Image (spheres, rainbow, N blue to C red):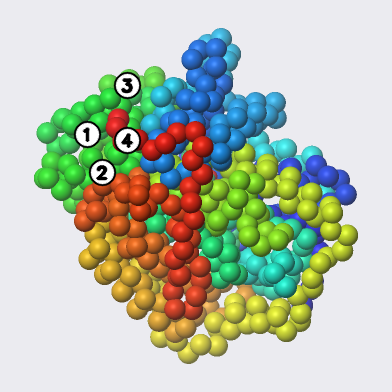
Amino acid sequence: MRKLKHDVIIIGSGLAGFRAAIEAAKNPELSVAIVSKVQLMRSHSVCAEGGTAAVMRPDMGDSYELHAWDTVRGADFLCDQDVVWRFVQDIPKELLMLEHWGIPWSRQADGRMDQRPFGGHSFDRATFAADKTGFFEMQTLYDTLQKYDNITRYDECYVSSILTKNGQFCGVAVWSLTSGEFFVIQGKSVVIATGGACRMYGFTTYSLTATGDGMAMAYRAGLPLKDLEFVQFHPTGLIPSGILMTEACRGEGGYLRNSKGERFMEKYAPGKMELSPRDVVSRAEQTEIEAGRGIVGPEGILGINLDLTHLGADRINERLPLIREVTIKLNFIDPIKEPIPIKPVAHYFMGGVHTDIDGATPVEGIWCAGEAACVSLHGANRLGSNSTGECLVWGKITGEKAAKFAAKSKAYLETPSDAALKDEENKVFGRFSTNGKESSYAVRHELQKAMDSFVGVFRTEAELVNALKTIKELKQKVSQFKVTDQGRVYNTDLMSAIESDNLLDLSEVIVTGAIARKESRGAHSRRDYPTRDDVNWLKHSMAYYTPQGPRMDYIPVAINMWNPVERKY
Ligand SMILES: Cc1cc2nc3c(=O)[nH]c(=O)nc-3n(C[C@H](O)[C@H](O)[C@H](O)COP(=O)(O)OP(=O)(O)OC[C@H]3O[C@@H](n4cnc5c(N)ncnc54)[C@H](O)[C@@H]3O)c2cc1C
């Protein structure tokens, strides 16, 4: 087996991975590897639509304090406030740097960067490039990466394990999807930037590739997963595909209407209406649907109307061209003339691999950034447009830290033994030899049905217990997966088996944490415990891997600016 060496390894080529790679590569002495299971620019980050929040107009009334307060309140007080404070100060610098690197921001008539309103923000601070913000941010970072000749890219290479020895990071095991080769990259430090995991839900905005591999690998390597029970439901997923209708639709002035044509948000959040935080809007929609005031969407699916018709053709064409293209092509609906059928959709993981404020995990040499990480910026509910920003800020921080660490280490600290490497290879290709009868696709489908039905916008003990039972039953089938394709090149059958295994482990953590948390906070809304319980539950959940299922533990929340108060919009 080939053993390659790079000082710093970045797993993932989304916004977090790219930003980390640029920062690490600034030290010309270091060799940096980017490993990604997709072609670098196909990461989910290119799908980000609406914008990136930052304080760019202090002269017009915005301030760090206001952005921080919006984030803390949006998070239902479960975020770490020192983390939030660092974020709001750093993100404007990142956006200005992207500006200098050439990003085509949408602009005002006078040439200044434009900003639009977003849910839960009390100032119009989402900086954007039409409704393709993530695409242009990615392209700008990708262009910038070309300046560094100390970066080696491993496109379409699947990392199957993070290797540690004697409590230290020592490398990653890699399966090249294009050549079929299995090899190891030894490294001094690593940044896990593998993104989110919403694909355990059937109705989701996420790319098929968002299977939480990095979280699952880290979990199995002994790292704790933090706050995973908090899954964000975005209020506007297109029926029936789940494709995101960006919050910018409402930021630009779109309305939500029930079957009676009413703007029902008046009843739930009269102050902020459609631009309330996502947990609030999703619950309102779900309540309307359950009360019989939903519209009947495509395929008979009940939903809500997202009405943009009053915005006019010019505004929609200039500000929301992607939305119009998608709804025309997929639903034969022109939003200039007709409302769009939507409903709450699984969209984002507030939780992830536990890190400190610098993105460092408890294992020496391992950092984590972006959606895979839980640095505790979003708490129990993320505000729209704060995630792309998190990727940029903690991409930079972790890239810099991982590089400094690698520069200090004179030699490769630990070498994985040949036996350990063989073992890793067997974990991947050993799945060929199973005479299994179970289809990983069918198992994933069953998992998605259970998660869609029982672990949604509202939760109850009985439903969660039901979901956990299903997950445990499905986990029994993993060792029985039948892998029909026996080749090593572009074997999506084998990849599906590994990814489904990952999704099952993460779903078990979500549901176990959700059963344990007997309160309602942010996106975790329990019908049987409808109020927030700061006395018992103002704490982060930490899930540790054991073969029997996660072991839960809890750590305190950093509160140094604002004490929790009732959350009203
Ligand atoms: C449709 C949509 C719209 C959004 N719009 C916005 C928005 O307007 N504003 C905002 O702030 N946020 C938005 N978000 C959220 C935000 O885009 C994401 O949270 C963020 O882009 C995640 O970036 P990331 O770098 O963490 O990971 P990703 O961009 O998801 O990249 C993950 C990377 O990890 C790699 N990877 C994963 N597993 C493996 C493996 N086993 N081996 C090798 N490589 C692996 C993948 O190949 C990929 O390169 C949106 C999300 C979606 C889905």
Q: Point out the tag, 4 or 3, that comes first from the N-terminus.
A: 3
Mark 4 beta carbon near ligand 1 (under 8 Å) = no
The type of residue carrying mark 1 is Tyr
User: Label 3: how many residues lie within 10 Å, few (<14), some (14-19) or many (20+)?
Assistant: some
Which tag, 4 or 1, sits closer to the chain's start?
A: 1
The residue lying toward the viewer, choosing from 566 and 137, is 566
83 in relation to 121, above or below: below
Q: Earlier in the sequence, mark 2 or mark 3?
A: 2
From this view, report whether residue 455 is shown above or below residue 316.
Answer: below
Q: Position of residue 17 (x, y in %)?
A: 64, 49
Give the quarter of the image for residue 173: bottom right
Q: CA distance from mark 2 to mark 3?
A: 25 Å
Q: Is mark 1 within 8 Å of ligand 1?
A: no
Q: Which residue is mark 1?
A: 268
- Quadrant containing the N terminus is bottom right
Gap between marks 4 and 3 measured at Cα:
30 Å
Q: Which residue is mark 4?
A: 567
